[in-house]
Image (cartoon, rainbow, N blue to C red):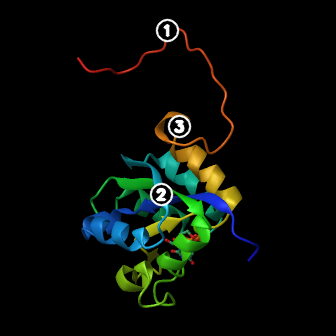
Amino acid sequence: MSGRQTNAVLILIKPDGLKKSLTGNILTRLSETKLEIVAAKMVRVSKDLAEEHYTHLRDKPFFPELIKYLQGELHDRRKVMALIYWGPDAIAKCRDIAGKTNPEEAESTSIRGSYGRILTTGLYENVIHVSSDESEAQREIKLWFSPDEIIVDLYPIKEVVHKECKQKTWA
Ligand code: UDP
Ligand code: MG
């Protein structure tokens, strides 16, 4: 790996992680990194968002099931928790704590090694998503968050004026 670099990484606590009440546990594990959380929210994942997130896997036979998994249809939990961690080597540190994609190959002390499993269909139910490199992190962060939802300026922004734009506010 090249030298230390400050970067940002998208973390998703997937529906199996939420169903198993692992949120606190996962955040505690990730806090070992000493990184800063710069954005966090709960998201009800649309099919479009799930397909765009996993667009690199569109040709895989497990793609339709993977989309259902991220949307929460396999766990009756139609939400994920999305967070951005930011700081020195954020991607490498979080990937390390997450463990390998295949939970059976992941180190037993890693998050995926501790809590993941392989479904009978072969799908890896591995509790969290972590962006794998800087370009993927940037693509994913822009997909999941708007600039206003992130408390630091990660990427260049532009300002646009919306006329007659309908927006929800408190009644
Ligand atoms: N996945 C799977 N089987 C595979 C590869 C991937 O079930 O052979 C699922 C798994 O849930 C994984 C997700 O698809 O987390 C995205 O795959 P990717 O290769 O991007 O792995 P990751 O970046 O999540 O480690
Ligand atoms: Mg990936």
Quadrant in which the N terminus appears: bottom right
* Mark sitting earlier along the chain (2/1): 2
Q: Is residue 147 left or right of residue 59?
A: left
State whether residue 118 appears in this view: no
Of all residues, the one furthest to the top in this rendering is: 164
Q: Nearer the viewer, mark 3 or mark 2?
A: 2
**Distance between the Cα atoms at labels 3 and 2?**
18 Å
Q: Is residue 58 left or right of residue 168?
A: right
Q: Which residue is label 3 attached to? A: 146
| In the depicted structure, whether residue 133 falls above or below residue 44 | below
Give the class, few, some or many, for how many residues have Cα within 10 Å of label 1's Cα (few <14, many ≥20): few
Disc 2 element:
strand
Quadrant in which the C terminus appears: top left
State whether residue 114 appears in this view: yes
**Distance between the Cα atoms at labels 1 and 3?**
20 Å
Towards the viewer: 87 or 9: 87
* Mark sitting earlier along the chain (3/2): 2
Whole-percent x, y for residue 8 in the image = 59, 56
Disc 1 element:
loop
Q: Which residue is label 2 attached to? A: 36
**Distance between the Cα atoms at labels 2 and 1?**
37 Å
Q: Is residue 21 left or right of residue 29?
A: left
* Mark sitting earlier along the chain (1/3): 3
Of all residues, the one furthest to the right in this rendering is: 2
Q: Which residue is label 1 attached to? A: 164
Name which residue type carries label 1: Glu
Whole-percent x, y for residue 59 in the image = 65, 65
Name which residue type carries label 2: Glu
Q: Nearer the viewer, mark 1 or mark 3?
A: 3
Q: Mark 2 touching mark 1, by CB under 8 A?
A: no
Whole-percent x, y for residue 148 in the image = 50, 34
